[in-house]
Image (tube, rainbow, N blue to C red):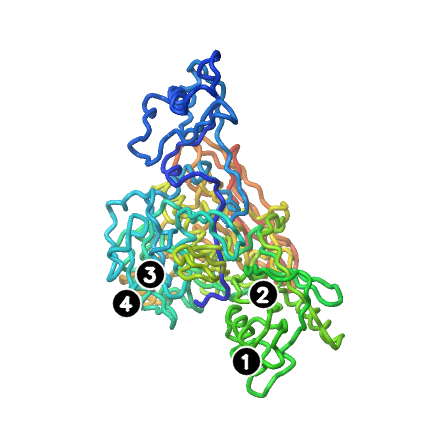
Amino acid sequence: MKILKIFLVFSILGCLSWPSIQSDLTTYIVQVESPESRISTQSLSDQDLESWYRSFLPNTIASTRSNDEEEPRLVYSYRNVMKGFAARLSAEQVKEMEKKEGFISAWPERILSLHTTHTPSFLGLQQNEGVWRHSNYGKGVIIGVLDTGISPDHPSFSDEGMPPPPAKWKGKCELNFTTKCNNKLIGARTFPQANGSPIDDNGHGTHTAGTAAGGFVKGANVFGNANGTAVGIAPLAHLAIYKVCDSFGCSDSGILSAMDAAIDDGVDILSLSLGGSTNPFHSDPIALGAYSATQRGILVSCSAGNTGPFEGAVVNEAPWILTVGASTLDRKIKATVRLGNKEEFEGESAFHPKVSKTKFFPLFNPGENLTDDSDNSFCGPGLTDLSRAIKGKIVLCVAGGGFNSIEKGQAVKNAGGVGMILINRPQDGLTKSADAHVLPALDVASFDGNNIIDYMKSTKKPVARITFQGTIIGDKNAPVLAGFSSRGPSTASPGILKPDIIGPGVNVLAAWPTPVENKTNTKSTFNIISGTSMSCPHLSGIAALLKSAHPTWSPAAIKSAIMTTADIVNLGNESLLDEMLAPAKIFAYGSGHVNPSRANDPGLVYDTQFKDYIPYLCGLNYTDRQMGNILQRITSCSKVKSIPEAQLNYPSFSISLGANQQTYTRTVTNVGEAKSSYRVEIVSPRSVSVVVKPSTLKFTKLNQKLTYRVTFSATTNITNMEVVHGYLKWSSNRHFVRSPIAVILQESETPED
């Protein structure tokens, strides 16, 4: 799938060095008494003072270096700011140190941020805390990325601090990658092999790989914007790269071959930021490959597509796939256009040049200069024909036309323009791209673009100036649904709610193979791009964290944990909004926005049994041949008791409801506390009665399974087809799991009693 826009990920994590994440130790600041109260510390040598500080450390770590760390446990020695030091310690070691004479206090350091690249912290991932600590940053998990290849020399893929790959790994590095692979990048293969090297000549694969599992890289930015330490979601996970796309696209045969190889190689997670049109599962290569991978215990994470906001366009919608939509961050990279009439419109841009904040330039709209064979409003290469009119002016360009924003800006620059105002499609709403432009430019919403055009029509000499405010953090509406993110309902299986989840996918910063600005260091370059291609590797990384923390969980259990703990409110504690800042619809966000910390400890999971996919597929009325395509063995649905789609033990509900009531069962598995009791809370969709029996689930042991029934019935006369939604939630003292309910109300005469 072509990416419609381009994005970026990562987070400022302070000044801790890489080895600090190799264990569950924490950096503590320790205050102690002066070595000798009778002697001024000023008279002590640094060596004497450090020796005194070291005497507080447990004997097992008092040496300069430990066996499993490259750096000293003693991080800093303080002389002037305080009497004390900073050291890498466990909580138990701090308790032991507290017993020593001269000890005053100790506290764990805070991780302070400047500006951040920013998605890990936006998702609540903090160094040495929570899910990152509990999962050891994804250590031991292998993420297979099917994409355009990788730039192996990028520092995001350094193996500093990385352990060797697990013994189960059977993959390889092909061709000229034999010297490029390391303990981070453990595999690199090309499909088809005739295409040669796994080197990424597009950028997309490097970006997605860095998002999922890139290591810590300080000073990541684009033109100084989104400045911070770049890091992937699972920074200690290993990466296996499968190049399946080239400049001509991504072939089904290559994708299937790569998935086949990845299963043998021993990956734990497969991440595919690609796809095509919707197809029945029996003729969808990604669905077929994902079915086999899931059967082997591999979780498959896929992008939902970039054809939003229109409904029914979601792709990669098989129930054994984690289907990921896209949303915004609480960060903007702000730019502003000010018109001659003093009106101002806010946009976004990763370009941050040193330009005058006071000088105005003439405006030019090539859309008013149409010819019979071209539409110059899209600012394609033919714009050079208007060079005489464009020179020295800011040019208005409309999104679309088969050219991306960088190509449009280059066309404007080639024609002599000094700036560009890129006007989004109406359906994009307030979703704006902060692209790394080649000249002063910004992306504005369609309705703001129309106001700019109206101003140009109102005066003979329209002028404007573009100013750049840079990185702004604190959007309380975030996360907002991205306008381009594909919506459900699923066409291949309407009884399964898709997409499953949404995650960061707008203006994400991550590794990039080539400079997007005038940099001399081409090995440490980053770019900001957008698409569900960017949200997918976020979820792939989160799945890797959960796999590391819970190695016995099945792909279905990991999916359930992610889905049932998702957020359905934004940072302002209001309902999720769409690209128009209207309440978002359930077929846009599925279960909600991912919350990694809660997903790590859900309490209950809907662990879909793999054998249940057979009666589910038979319920889709597939022929025996079509079933054989998926199962890779002869199966006769005449010998199988089929089930309705909504009966599959899935973490969500999607049903079409008329006059007749419908009842489905769900089975949950206790992965929280051995003895626990859960009560149900129901938020019924409008005009729908939802009854759950029993209303309480009492567990007596871990991994115990209990089943409940849900009955849906219409409560009013339905005269028009309508989509309504709600949820049911099981809550204990410590946990809750929420299952979203999407109901398509079908016209009926009289509801059943």
Q: What element does badge 2 sit on?
A: loop
Residue 318 in view, yes or no: yes
Q: What element does badge 1 sit on?
A: helix
Q: Answer with left or right where residue 88 lies relative to residue 397.
A: left
Question: What amino acid is labelled 4 in the image?
Answer: Gly
Question: What amino acid is labelled 1 in the image?
Answer: Thr
Residue 319 in view, yes or no: no
Bin the neighbour count of mark 2 within 10 Å (Cα to Cα): few under 14, some 14-19, many 20 and up: many
Tag 3 and tag 1, C-beta contact below 8 Å:
no
Q: Nearer the viewer, residue 684 or 247?
A: 247
Q: What element does badge 3 sit on?
A: helix
Residue 384 tag number: 1
Q: Which residue is mark 2?
A: 440
Marks 3, 1: nearer the viewer: 1
Q: Earlier in the sequence, mark 3 or mark 1?
A: 3
Q: Which residue is mark 4?
A: 196
How far apart in space, not on screen, are marks 4 and 3 (Cα)?
23 Å
Question: What amino acid is labelled 2 in the image?
Answer: Pro
Q: Answer with left or right where residue 717 lies relative to residue 113.
A: right
Bin the neighbour count of mark 1 within 10 Å (Cα to Cα): few under 14, some 14-19, many 20 and up: many
Q: Position of residue 137 (x, y in %)?
A: 39, 42
How far apart in space, not on screen, are marks 1 and 4 (Cα)?
37 Å
Q: Which residue is mark 3?
A: 289
Question: What amino acid is labelled 3 in the image?
Answer: Gly
* Residue at the (28%, 53%) spot, across then down: 181
Q: Earlier in the sequence, mark 1 or mark 4?
A: 4
